[in-house]
Image (spheres, rainbow, N blue to C red):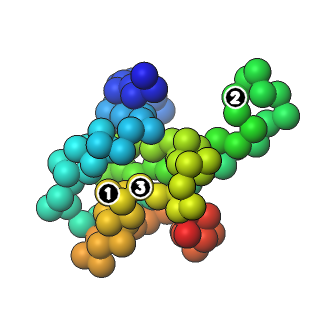
Amino acid sequence: GRDQRMSLSSFYGVPELDVFYTSNESQAEAFLEEWSEDREFGLYTRVLHSDNKAFFPVHVVLLGICRGTRVLIFDLQPFLREVPTPLPAPLAAFLEDKRRLFFGMDLKRSSGRLA
């Protein structure tokens, strides 16, 4: 499967990161449940385009949510082909929860990409 949990070693003063990469809705939901009481998060999206299909698909769309040294990277690309809305229900509910505050670069543009 595409699910991967990894630790990224400390570098340039940044602490070791606990990263979970997945495109599995239930795995992401379980990861997000660990943050049910937390209120502040980092958020980013990344859209990659390539003409070299052998390297990676033409469009790769990643959603990253982080809290402290824990990071969830969710691959939205499979959902872009299958459903009209790219956000699975658990991710949408997490992001739309008004009790949470998200920080990041260009969040207005990221929100537009996710809508």
**Of 102 and 114, which appears nearest the observer?**
114
Name the foreground residue: 8 vs 91: 91
Could you tell me which quadrant the N terminus lies in? top left
- Give residue 20's position: percent from left, percent from top: 36, 34
Q: Is residue 95 left or right of residue 75?
A: left
Above or below, 37 against 80 in this view is below
Quadrant of the rendered image containing residue 9: top left
Determine which quarter of the picture holds residue 41: bottom left
User: Pointer 1: residues within 10 angstroms few (<14), some, or many (20+)?
Assistant: some
- In the displayed structure, 26 sits above or below 86; it is above
Q: Quadrant of residue 72?
A: top left
Q: Residue at x 36, y 72 (%)?
A: 96
Residue at left offset 85%, top offset 34%: 51
Q: Amino acid at mark 2?
A: Phe
Q: Gap in Å between the C-alphas at discs 3 and 1? A: 6 Å
Q: Position of residue 47 (x, y in %)?
A: 66, 49
Residue receiving disc 1: 90
Residue 112, which numbered label?
A: none
Vertical order, 81 against 87 (above or below): above
**Label 3–label 1 contact, CB within 8 A:** yes
Three-letter code for the amino acid on which mark 1 is drawn: Pro
- Is residue 68 in sight in this rendering? no
Mark nearer the N terminus (2 vs 1): 2
Q: Position of residue 43 (x, y in %)?
A: 45, 58
N-terminal label among 3 and 2:
2
As helix, strand or loop, the secondary structure at mark 2 comes to: loop
Task: Give the Cα distance between marks 2 and 1.
Answer: 26 Å
For mark 2, what is the residue?
56
Crowd class of label 2 (few under 14; some 14 to 19; many from 20; radius 10 Å):
few
The residue under label 3 is: 88
Task: Report, in whole angstroms, how far the alpha carbon at label 3 lies from the one at label 2.
Answer: 22 Å
Work out which quarter of the rendered image holds the C terminus and state it: bottom right
